[in-house]
Image (cartoon, helix red, strand yellow):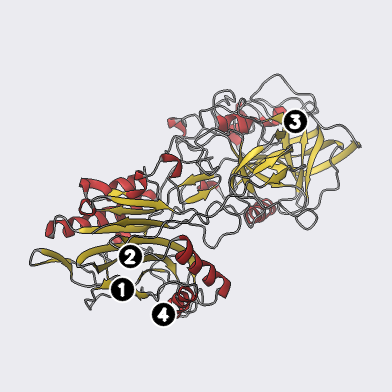
Amino acid sequence: MARSAAVSTVVATALAAGLLAATSSAASSTGAPDAGEVRVHDIQGTTRLSPLAGQQVGDVPGIVTGVRTYGSKGFWIQDPKADDDRATSEGVFVYTGANPTVRTGDAVRVSGTVTEYVPGGAGSGNQSLTQITKPTVTVESSGNELPAPVTVNAASVPSAYAPAGDPADGNSVNKLPLRPRSYALDLYESLEGMNVRVGSSRVVGASDPYNELWVTVKPHENNTRRGGARYGSYEAQNTGRLQIQQLAPVSEQPFPKADVGDVLTGVTEGPLDFNQFGGYTLTARSLGKVVGKGLEREHTRPQRERELAVATYNVENLDPGDPQAKFDALAQAVVTHLASPDIVALEEIQDNNGAKNDGTVAADQTLKKFTDAIAAAGGPRYAWRSVDPENNKDGGEPGGNIRQVFLYNPERVSFTDRDGGDATTPTDVVRQGKRAALTHSPGRIDPANAAWTNSRKPLAGEFTFRGRTVFVVANHFASKGGDESLTSHHQPPSRSSEVQRVKQAEAVNAFVRKVRAAERNADVVVLGDINDFEFSPATQALEAGGALRAGIKSLPRAERYSYVYQGNSQVLDQILVSPGVGRFAYDSVHINAEFSAQNSDHDPQIVRFKP
């Protein structure tokens, strides 16, 4: 999730500590102009790194196009006398560290040090932001007309996202000449710091608590049925996406609330910034008006008498200290929007005192409060099964001890209890007569496997529905923490977290194969927050050998998503089924991810079939 306020603090702290390293190699690659002749396009240069990084510049002329008085404080200037090179930006950010004394429309001359700052640090892989720091500013006149904005629209943004990085430079694009007519990231980089404008644009990422939203300037680019922009492959980054923030403090001008599919109408205009939590960001000096399109939360159909309904829902760090309103809203989602499934696999159930880090691991109070809320909302009186984790061994919020939990409706489903499963004892598969069975139910799959280090261990359970055994495996794979963003200077970006998820998927796949070796036509459901896409290596590893099928692939492409991140509607939550399940009906129930008001940031998934 985006964290604009945090990155502003990081920028300011790093600058104050002198952590903006001079890029001597870049500075030496192009001779600096004579003193007094430096203009903004000389500072920006024709690559992502300034040829003047680390050098002092004096009396750089420009018109102030925006002033930021919070977070990373400073202002943008733009040279009204542009050169004829599309690759060189005419705008640059001037970091002051305190409230600037200039105003929009001032004609200024700025002296200071040219720096390249990497939001998030060099290890993040992020591109750098060219700035002038430790400035001395002379105001020559006020009330000047601003440089005409560059309009960013469907016609101006290339369809290709980024060039391949230079293998000789660690797959970095930093030193490659910018080609703004060929690549979207090159276009945005060539406009870094400049006054840009977007016209009426569809919202593809809802307003968030950090006062930002995402729009697309390409209305037909991988659009979803409900107005989003679908991320359907590593080559479909959705080039038309831009993050929108505002320059006015929210205390003076509240940021608008918008859901996916709404339209930011009129003109939105301001300097183009780059930050850690979203990359290229239009910091709006003037912000358009949000026109709502009335997006509604979906309802899945109820299961029929002979259908078993199995769902997964990440309830986002639920603990007894959360407001009753959160429990009630999540309960309403289960009852009304999911039609009270027979089995619900929950992710991110925290222990009885939440993030208090005192060794508590039991979660019975959390689950009682939740199941009481479901019953009060008119749902069934769910029973539950789980395995308490070892303290602080499963990742997530320290002290929270998140885990997966099975809720089940005992009026329709029975649970086969086989004792002995605990945090460190693995469950296994045995053959009983002609059927497969678990040695421990509930039990954890291969918890000592290094694949589960600092991550949630899969929870396996054995259920019976209308006399038929169904094996369910609830998962919460390792997060994407540590992965580089789509706007990384490495192209393609590094996805380091993928390695662990592939190993986790291989472990679950091996377990499913054991079940199928004992009972070829066994009904196995593997579900949860897989934290990866339907086209990812992790999903491929889960499906390997035909052991499982990803249910979300049965949906039309425009409906394959459960999460919205930086304006990309994408898959993180999944349900996969074994061949024995046969025909099934799958639904991704969109009730959270597309909305500014969320009870969780994930959409639940549900599958229905006849065992």
Circle number at residue 423: 1
Q: Give the image location of residue 282, x and y in percent.
A: 68, 41
Q: Secondary structure at mark 3?
A: loop
Q: Quadrant of residue 110?
A: top right
Extreme residue in the front direction = 305
Front in this rendered view, residue 566 or 147: 566
The answer to whether residue 500 of the structure is visible from this angle is: no
The answer to whether residue 71 of the structure is visible from this angle is: yes
Disc 2 target residue: 457
Q: Give the image location of residue 510, x and y in percent.
A: 21, 55
Circle number at residue 593: none
What's the amino acid at mark 2?
Lys
* For discs 3 and 4, the disc positioned in front in the rendered view: 4
For label 1, count other residues whose C-alpha is less than 10 Å away and answer few (under 14), some (14-19) or many (20+). Answer: some
Disc 4 target residue: 364
Which of the marked residues, 4 or 2, is nearer the chain's N terminus?
Answer: 4
Q: Secondary structure at mark 2?
A: loop
